[in-house]
Image (cartoon, helix red, strand yellow):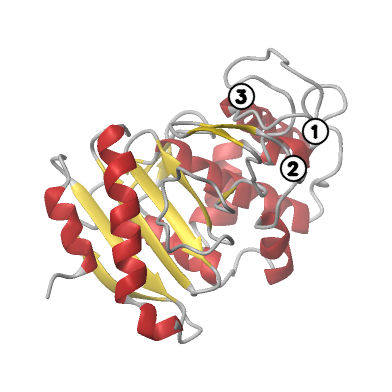
Amino acid sequence: MRRALDHLDSWPVEIAAAAVISAAKKTPFVTDSAGPLSVELRWASITKIVTALAVLVAYEEGVLELDEPCGPPGATVRHLLAHASGLATEGNRVICAPGRRRIYSNAGFEVLAGHLEDRSGIPFAVYLEEAVLQPLGMASTRLDGSPASGAIGPLEDLVRVAEELLSPQTISKETLREATTVAFDGLDGVLPGFGRQEPNDWGLGVELRSEKHPHWTGSLCSPSTFGHFGQAGGFIWVDPERRLACASLSNRNFGAWAALRWPKLSDAVLAEHQSTYG
């Protein structure tokens, strides 16, 4: 019988690794994996999840507040985490007032990192290391460049992120719940690679699947599924209803190949594990 992760064999990539993580027994554990788990690969925009975790740790430590001013006039830390600040994707151009549209913004996460540096007096890369990477045991992951897209690390470290999102250790369950609930409900916008979504729901640093179509997760994923994918050819999603997560990295940039194959893999994973949650 073909296992779900055998789908990787048909991917047009030189390197691909994937893992399935379950919290059906409360403590997350890897149920299956394929490909090289220790090869360091670019995370691209998956980086935003660990950057968001660092900001949320800072919030819980009292370094900053989610609703304090940050970014364009009228915007807050919460707006920036939720791609609702009005900032353009790149640069400092403001496209609209905060809270009006969902505009995916790498620039917003760079502003966030700078704001955290100012508030804490600690370089962002150091804060990220001490607040997130070290506590989660992500010894082989580093930030090489932008806090929006510069993480490099192996799949085994991305698995640590999945485990954290299933059963948080660096932040409280309450903060994770807030981060994975729609922020600024009803905002429309473009989901990169998948077109305009009405609404285009996001939480704080994570995209929410909701009822979006088309989408990079599987059709069997519950609407509460959240995660992120990266232009470098990787993704992570967590389905909190099924207590299941899937993470993958590759060495080929996102494109039509991924938009076609990622949902098939995700649906196969969910079907394979149905007995654990159904």
Question: Relative to 32, is 100 on the left or the right?
Answer: right
Residue 129 lies, in percent from the top left, at 52, 49
Q: Quadrant of the N terminus?
A: bottom left
Marked residue nearer the N-terminal end (1 or 3): 1
Residue type at tag 1: Gly
Cβ atoms at labels 2 and 1 below 8 Å apart: no
| Closer to the eye: label 1 or 3 | 1
| Residue at 51 percent of width and 52 percent of height | 227
Q: How many residues crowd mark 1 within 10 Å: few (<14), some (14–19), many (20+)?
A: many
Q: Which residue is mark 3?
A: 107
Q: Residue 262, image x and y in percent?
A: 32, 49
Q: Which residue is mark 2?
A: 186
Q: CA distance from mark 3 to mark 2?
A: 22 Å
Q: Residue at x 69, y 53 (%)?
A: 56
Q: Is residue 149 left or right of residue 69?
A: left
Secondary structure at numbered mark 1: loop
- Badge 3, how many Cα within 10 Å: few under 14, some, many 20+? many
Q: Amino acid at mark 2?
A: Gly
Where residue 86 appears, as percent x and y from the top left, is: 73, 24
Q: Could you tell me which secondary element the residue under label 2 belongs to?
A: loop
Q: Earlier in the sequence, mark 2 or mark 1?
A: 1
Q: Could you give the CA–CA distance between mark 1 and mark 3, rounded to whole angstroms? A: 16 Å
Mark 1 — residue?
Answer: 99
Q: Nearer the viewer, residue 123 or 39?
A: 39
Q: Quadrant of residue 21?
A: bottom left
Crowding near the residue tagged with mark 2, few <14, some 14–19, many ≥20 C-alpha atoms within 10 Å: some
Amino acid on which the number 3 mark rests in the picture: Ala
